[in-house]
Image: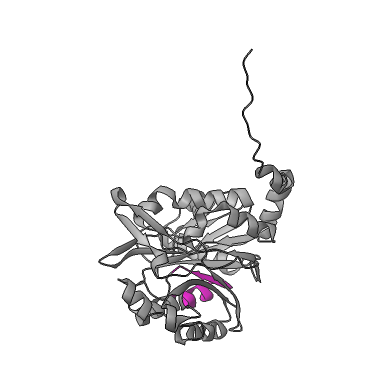
Amino acid sequence: MFMCNLRSSVKHLASLSALGRHHILQNRMSTSPNPVAAICQITATPNKEANFSACKQLLEEARQRGACMVFLPEGFDYIGSSREETLSLSEPLGGDIISRYTQLARKLDVWLSLGGFHERGHDWENDRRIYNSHVIINNKGDILSVYRKSHLFDVELPEKGVSLKESAFTIPGGSLVPPVQTPIGKVGLGVCYDLRFPELSLALQRHGADILTYPSAFTVATGAAHWEVLLRARAIETQCFVLAAAQVGRHHEKRSSYGHALAVDPWGEVLGDCGGEKPGMVLVEVNLDKVNRTRKNMPVQQHRRDTAFYHNTNMVAKPTGQ
């Protein structure tokens, strides 16, 4: 299983052989005094069993390399080729696929961020729609939090060949959920298109998030234009780590994803990038002192005005002449 590039190590390791880089990096990560997170990149298809097998292999490798929490992308369970297939493959939260991941978390003694599960809606028999659900499982196999994606991707970009209407089969989530205390820090949950809404990230930061996560399946066109810059912006404005697992490559004849699973630090520096070609993972140390130092040295949140200031409707331009 291939391991993605860590940009922060490139200069230091530039003169070493590829084998030497891999060996030193692996040792450094496994002996880190800070907790280690694994941000994964996969190519899901409509074959749920094959997807689970690929994810299981990544989880086992991540745990072997010292990760205490592993992040999987939106659609980790599958990516269907039609509305009908997407709905037919869906499951309730208490179904087989999540049960298998809870068992795996317990067996490996690892926390999981399952970043976009096709969860059957509460009125499935009548409504036949699903939630796009981000599920957090602890190392005991307990489901600690479920965030249901609140911003749905209904976008037509004819010139880019992008046409998706998520609301045709997905119910928008009704609210944010509080950041979850994990071994790497307090994690605030989003999913994919939520990345475009800074209000969400700022709300999670105000509620104590140290880390934001946006598991995604960005299209190739929108990913090339916006993926990295948006992730870095969310990190900079909240002064949080941002961890974003991603889908990559061709899922079926109708859909491909951009890839480039990223880890970004609170200063906006990209720590790791999985590239846009194949599955893999990036391992990153999550040093919360970096969050604290960044916020102390540039106290953006203290400088923020009250809510009323930003909702002021009396912004009438005053004459400047005479």
Residue 190, image x and y in percent?
54, 63
Which range of residues does the magenta coloring cover? Answer: 58-74
Quadrant that contains the N terminus: bottom left
- Against 2, residue 242 (above or below) is above
Measuring 39% from the left and 52% from the top, which residue is drawn there? Answer: 222
Measuring 64% from the left and 40% from the top, which residue is drawn there? Answer: 313
Residue 46 visible at all: no
Residue 135, image x and y in percent?
54, 74
Q: Is residue 68 magenta?
A: yes
Which of the two residues, 243 or 131, is positioned nearer the viewer here?
A: 131
In which quadrant of the rendered view does residue 4 lie? bottom left
Residue 162 visible at all: yes
Total numbered labels placed on residues in the image: 0
Which of the two residues, 100 or 205, is positioned nearer the viewer here?
A: 205
Which of the two residues, 159 or 280, is positioned nearer the viewer here?
A: 159
Measuring 72% from the left and 43% from the top, which residue is drawn there? Answer: 303
In which quadrant of the rendered view does residue 140 lie? bottom right
Q: Is residue 311 magenta?
A: no
- Against 46, residue 229 (above or below) is above
- Residue farthest to the top, as pictured: 322
Residue 256, image x and y in percent?
32, 62
Quadrant that contains the C terminus: top right
Q: Is residue 292 left or right of residue 78?
A: right
Measuring 66% from the left and 61% from the top, which residue is drawn there? Answer: 209
Residue 113, image x and y in percent?
54, 72
Which of the two residues, 30 or 52, is positioned nearer the viewer here?
A: 52
Instruction: Identify the image's colour scheme: rainbow, by chain, secondary structure or one colour.
Output: one colour
- Against 9, residue 304 (above or below) is above
